[in-house]
Amino acid sequence: MRPLPLLVAVAPLFSLLVLACGGPPPAQAPAPASTVPAVPSRPDEPHLADLRQLTFGGENAEAYWSWGGDQLILQARGPGQSCDRIYRTRPFDPRPTFAPVSSGQGATTCSFFLPGDQDVIYASTHLGGPDCPPRPDQSKGYVWALYPSYDIFRTKADGSGLVRLTDTPGYDAEGTVCGKDGSIVFTSVRDGDVDLYRMDSDGKNVRRLTDTPGYDGGAFFNADCTKIVWRASRPKGNDLNEFRALLAKGLVRPSKLELYVADADGSDARQITYLDAASFAPYWQPSQKRILFSSNYAAPSPREFDLWAVDIDGTRLERVTSAPGFDGFPMFSPDGKTLAFSSNRATAEGKHDTNLFTARWVESEPRVQETGADRTMRDVVWLADPAREGRGVGTHGIEDAGAYVEHAMQSAGLAPAGTEGYRLPFEATTNVTGAAALVVGGKAAASTDAQPLAFSSSGSVEAPVVDAGWGIVTDGWDDYARVDARGKIVLVRRFVPDDPKFEKHDDKSRHGDLRRKSFLAREHGAKGILVVDLAKDQEEARFPELHADVAGDAGIVAAIGSRQILAPVADALKKHARVTAKIEVTLKPETARAFDVVARWPAAAQGKLPGVVVVGAHYDHLGFGGHDSLAPGQHVAHPGADDNASGTAALLEVGRLLAGAPGLRRDVVLVAFSGEETGVLGSTWFVKHPPAGVAPADIVAMLNMDMVGRLRDNALQVFGTETATDWPDLVARACDVARVDCVHAPGGGFGASDHSPFYGAGVPVLHFFSGVHTDYHKPSDTADKLNAAGMAQTARIVASLATGLANRDHRLDYRNVASPPPGGDVRSFGSSLGTVPDYGGPPKGQQGMLLAGVRPGGAAEKAGLKRGDVLVHLGDHLISGVEDLMFVLTESKPGSTMKAVVVRDGKEVTVDVTLQAARPR
């Protein structure tokens, strides 16, 4: 492992230490004592007991355990020696001795045992010559050299049988070993940067693990070799330019070092510290959920290094040692009972020795120095607990979650800003109940043999039945080609045919293919539709459940019937028999009182500016749902840790940070929205029915956090930076202060989250997002997978922006920006109308699709459509909701002109629209 970029070159001790693998390093051929004396323990170091000092002079460091736990291998340099040398010792002997491993030629560093303890690796410069390489010129500041003659070698534990493992130009060192297969993670400059690589124990099969500009080194595998931890610097701007200029000369002057954890192939890399200090030599604690490392964080002097510990999500930061001077290079014995580390705690005043120590590790509750990571994770764990019932609208769990958020805002000192204290209530549809009465050929079916579909019209229809096969119309397939469905009830099969043209729908899907089949039946003039599963070689699928989020009048009476009742109908129709049916559907939506939680951090009375800044996140989630591991009909609460307990926790942290800010000149309003998962209901209600002083015209900007819990590669996605001219500079400054790489996502301010209604109402917006993952909307979206440190940094960024906007003399200039169409108006093929649906729906149960906005330059804007219009027809097609528009656009060709009919101010308005090509997502 390689030189730590310490800002301590003024002391000879640290000038030598920085040549080590993981940071400060080693010493002489260690001088054994007649006996190993006990070292007095310190009451403020409760984790360390039975301390023993193994070396007594020179510089001794980077002592790493054998896999058998009975040996240590280390590098040392004694008084008068120019280079480090590798040694082995048995630390539990009463009088440990030190056997040389390396030859003494050149400089050596970074040694480690291979599994079985018969072989070891280390890095050496001896092929570049037997002498020590020259030290770099420090006259222009502290730098360390990446000696190109460093390569990694393998030998027997006694130093015999030397084999070269790396043979590329430039620096190869800092190797450590996986205990399962002997593979080696190491640092190299072979591709023009300082990155991590992994190779087999024989030096073959080299693969690169990191590729972000900067220094990556000092990596260690966890116990099962599924993850690695390492130290890294990530210089930016002028610092990056200087880094590259020095690297071209074989030199490095890293900036502050932070710790990263990733999967063993380098993927899913997460920065877990933001200490703005020199942190290095990370090693896995026995639990494999916590990291021990060395840092000068919070030290009175940059030369003061202590051991610290932190969980791999960035929580529970704890100072482990407190002795004056240097403590570093911690490594646990394989049984987790003994810690080896280097320290100068017993060095006499005026000397600069660093010696090797062991201690019995005492596991106890960490003495946590609480940070934003702890606070945000504590909130997420509570919100994502199964007791919250998935925070679905209408559950007791979301009531409890709202009360929790309300209490947290109150505790942070924020004032209530809703219409009922902290609450802004609204009604949300939570369930649909209903029944279908089915009569076939004059015979009434049992109530258990028929069920309405959630999007059916309520009403009664009686008509002849025609067989429309699968009820599908697509390229090369048309089940209505030989069927006159006008005025009839069509019988269609459930799912799709076993044909390469189709992918079978998941039976657990709420929509499946049924909504589209009902649309096609209505388009072909049918008065009703009956669905049946006729796959006789398979068990009959259960009826789909009624769900509020797929409810809505599709303009046709629609029901599903049992195989027992409808299979004979299909057989009779094949024989050209006449069959008449009657379907009577009654559906009743059930609503519940939901509420946004609204709080205000008031501006100082003197010099107060007009307008407010809104910061928001939604606290609801999906509630209960099915899962592949469950039997049909069974449900489990979806935790929604990332979506969006993470954003809610970050919102609460923003509130706490605002409480520590000096007097603001504008109010900052924090809103935890409900109903986002069912169509941004809470944020839409907020925009349409705002509390006093928070109308859209009053809002300077809206900052939204949705899914900010899985920050990877320290990169935070920021949407909406084009919605105001000044956003890029403002965001860059806030992100630089937080030391986070903010990626400006292209496009405007519309999107499937709570910022969209604000942007449609003329407010500049930003949406902060840590990225997609495979646990999205699944029961596996749990709190243990979050990066708490990243959440806390996101809150810092948003709090910084909110504070800056609150103190800014001038308002932002709103920009109406074209962006790729999201939601219902998008396909990788077909056409785009350029509309943004309002999922709250039209007023008073009116059919049609309510427009939350139109996209700049889109077909709808060019045709004169606008926010608040209700689209009811497009061409020959009735539009009863956003799904119908999706179906029409999917099958329509770009460039075609249609008549669009909208209801505006109670009157129908007809315009010509020319469809545009849809942009692929």
Image (tube, rainbow, N blue to C red):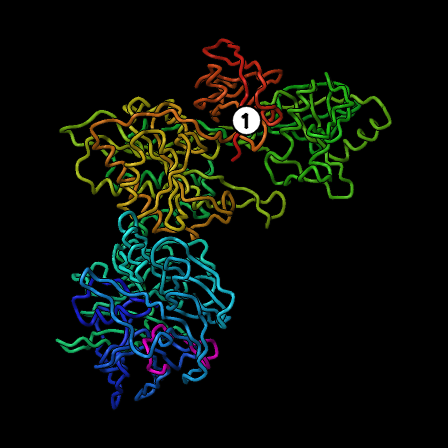
Number of marks in the rendered image: 1
Q: Is residue 781 magenta?
A: no
Where's residue 45, x and y in %? 24, 69
Identify which residue, 537 or 525, lies in the foreground. Answer: 525
Using residue 106 as the reference point, say whether residue 850 is left or right of it.
right
Where's residue 86, x and y in %? 34, 79
Q: Is residue 108 magenta?
A: yes
Where disc 1 sits, the SS reads strand
Point out the residue furthest to the top here.
907
Where's residue 585, x and y in %? 65, 23
Where's residue 619, x and y in %? 40, 38
Identify which residue, 527 or 443, lies in the foreground. Answer: 527
Which region shows up in magenta? Answer: 102-120
Type of amino acid under label 1: Ala
The answer to whether residue 578 is seen in the rendering is yes
From the image, tell me which residue sits under label 1: 917
The answer to whether residue 593 is seen in the rendering is no
Identify which residue, 289 or 133, lies in the foreground. Answer: 133
Q: Residue at x 57, y 20 (%)?
A: 895
Point out the residue furthest to the bottom here.
34
Seen in the picture, residue 43 relative to 423 is either above or below; the reply is below
| Quarter of the rendering containing residue 694 | top left
Q: Quadrant of the N terminus?
A: bottom left
Q: Residues within 10 Å of mark 1 (few under 14, many from 20)?
A: many
Seen in the picture, residue 850 relative to 652 is either above or below; the reply is above
Point out the residue furthest to the right here.
575
Using residue 620 as the reference point, say whether residue 546 is left or right of it.
right
